[in-house]
Image (tube, helix red, strand yellow):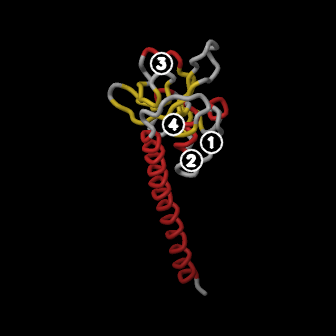
Amino acid sequence: MNTKSFLKPFHLICFLGVVLTFGSCSSARKIRNQNIQQVVETAKSFHGTPYRYGGVNRSGMDCSALVYLSFSSVGVTLPRTTDEQSKVGKKVSKRKLRQGDVVFFATGKRRRKVTHAGIVTQRTGGGIQFIHASTSLGVTEDNVFSSYWSRRFIRGRRVF
């Protein structure tokens, strides 16, 4: 076998490997984006559900249940509590948050203890909207940069 006849199949295999590798990145990104969209749509389907500590259904739920149920809609099993959820995924700064990221806040007396969670629904010119289960309003959306939430923000996490 001469060198030229050996190199042609070798180059073809390398070329196909590169195409398959980069093609799979594109399809993986598409699946990830579809999953993020599904998580957000599931969370929004609970809009108006009343708050109930420990609740896990449409008759009442808490913030960690909203996060838990929304991610389970795409087969991602997160811990049930806000504190444990805040340890899953990659840390994301407030300014780099994007749709599908989980945001965590300290709403209790201890300033650095995570006690509340929500899911980023969209970035807008006016800030970053997130959906959460509020004790007073039930499942609702707010702006991360509002005076109330901005002061209580602890961290963001990217699950996907």
Closest to the camera, between mark 2 and mark 3, is 2
Residue pointed to by mark 3: 150
Instruction: Indicate the amino acid at tag 1.
Output: Leu
Residue pointed to by mark 1: 78
Indicate left or right for 43 with 78 as reference: left
The answer to the question of whether label 1 and label 3 lie on touching residues, with beta carbons closer than 8 A, is: no
**Residue lying at the far left of the rendered structure:** 125
Instruction: Classify mark 1: helix, strand or loop.
Output: loop
Instruction: Indicate the amino acid at tag 3.
Output: Ser
The N terminus sits in image quarter:
bottom right
Residue 59's label in the rendered image is 4
Instruction: Indicate the amino acid at tag 4.
Output: Ser
Closest to the camera, between mark 1 and mark 4, is 4
Gap in angstroms between the C-alphas marked 2 and 1 = 8 Å
Gap in angstroms between the C-alphas marked 4 and 2 = 18 Å
- Residue at 45% x, 32% y is 131
Instruction: Classify mark 4: helix, strand or loop.
Output: loop
Closest to the camera, between mark 1 and mark 3, is 1
The first of marks 1 and 3 along the sequence is: 1
Instruction: Indicate the amino acid at tag 2.
Output: Ser
